[in-house]
Amino acid sequence: PDCANKIEQVLNKTEGVKKADVHYTTSKANVEYDPDKIDIAGLKKAVAKTGYQVEKTK
């Protein structure tokens, strides 16, 4: 599904993100990031650019 791929691509191009995996079937993403370069708010903004929202689960 394109939506998961789109979000994954945007996150992986975001400075501070080491790795992002978005899972369409579970509607979840696992994101490894450098907290010195980006915070949760920054990750949410990156996802918002794709037209989707983030719900923190962990």
Image: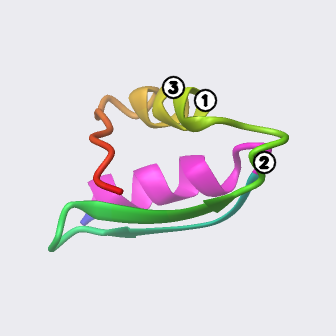
The kind of secondary structure element at disc 1 is: helix
At x 36%, y 57%, the residue is: 58
Q: How far separated are the C-alphas under marks 2 and 3?
A: 13 Å
Q: Is residue 22 above or below residue 39?
A: below
Residue at 55% across, 56% down: 9
Question: Badge 2 is on which residue?
Answer: 16
Confirm whether the magenta stretch covers residue 13: yes
The quadrant in which residue 36 appears is: top right
Residue underneath mark 3:
45
Disc 3 and disc 1 in contact, CB within 8 angstroms = yes
Mark 2 or mark 3: whose residue is earlier in sequence: 2
In the picture of the structure, the residue carrying the numbered disc 1 is 42
- Marking on residue 13: none
Number of residues whose C-alpha sits closer than 10 Å to that of mark 2, classed few (under 14), some (14–19) or many (20 or more): some
Three-letter residue code for mark 2? Gly
Of helix, strand and loop, which one carries label 2?
A: loop
